[in-house]
Image (cartoon, grey):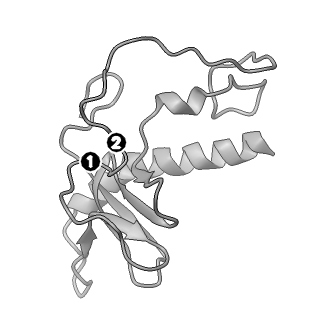
């Protein structure tokens, strides 16, 4: 079950990241409404932080940025690819990837752009389009 959810999550993020910027840069179809770009999204209520905030309120910007972190996990793995169904993916593997949006830890339903600089969605939230930050790069440094 966990593998299926991970696979679905990665497929969704990969598809949105792959096609989101292309869709966002296309001109709207004739008669279509111009997308309303937002810096984040809240399913219920409003976002807590203002647009163009510099850091999340619980982040210490001048914290030391050197050192080593070792995490332990009970069990085993035989796969370093969390997307495929075969084998058991290594624990914590999803922590090495950035996501399009980042949930704020002090808000229940607030998410803000991380790789995405903006998000557009209709009021009924039936679809979503992401606009990637210009500095976002693929692992091979393209785009």
Q: Secondary structure at mark 2?
A: loop
Q: Residue at x 38, y 77 (%)?
A: 46
Tell me the CA gap for discs 2 and 1: 7 Å
Q: Is residue 135 above or below residue 120?
A: above
Q: Residues within 10 Å of mark 2 (few under 14, many from 20)?
A: few
Answer with the quarter of the image where residue 119 lies: bottom left
Q: Secondary structure at mark 1?
A: loop
> In front: 44, or 19?
44
- Residue 21: where, in percent of width, then height? 29, 53
Cβ–Cβ below 8 Å for labels 2 and 1? yes
Q: Residue at x 33, y 31 (%)?
A: 138
Q: Residues within 10 Å of mark 1 (few under 14, many from 20)?
A: few
Q: Is residue 98 above or below residue 76?
A: below
Q: Which mark is residue 40?
A: none
- Residue 56: where, in percent of width, then height? 32, 50
- Residue 54: where, in percent of width, then height? 20, 49
Q: Residue at x 32, y 22 (%)?
A: 140
- Residue 137: where, in percent of width, then height? 28, 32
> In front: 10, or 60?
60
Residue identified by numbered label 1: 55
**Which residue is most to the bottom?**
31
Quadrant of the snapshot with the N terminus: top right
Q: Is residue 64 above or below residue 109?
A: above
Q: Which mark is residue 59?
A: 2
Q: Is residue 101 above or below residue 142?
A: below
**Which residue is most to the top?**
68
Answer with the quarter of the image where residue 99 lies: top left
Decide if residue 107 is on the left or right side of residue 40. Answer: right
């Amino acid at each position: 079950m966990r593998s299926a959810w991970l696979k679905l999550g990665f497929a969704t993020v990969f598809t949105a990241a792959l096609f989101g910027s292309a869709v966002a840069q296309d001109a709207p179809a004739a008669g279509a409404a111009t997308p309303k770009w937002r810096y984040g999204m809240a399913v219920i209520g409003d976002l807590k932080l203002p647009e163009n905030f510099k850091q999340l309120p619980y982040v210490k910007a001048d914290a030391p940025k050197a050192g080593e972190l070792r995490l332990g996990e009970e069990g085993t793995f035989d796969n370093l690819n969390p997307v495929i169904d075969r084998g058991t993916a290594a624990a914590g593997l999803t922590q090495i990837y950035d996501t399009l949006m980042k949930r704020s830890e002090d808000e229940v339903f607030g998410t803000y752009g991380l790789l995405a600089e903006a998000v557009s969605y209709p009021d009924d939230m039936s679809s979503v389009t992401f606009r990637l930050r210009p500095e976002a790069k693929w692992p091979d440094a393209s785009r």
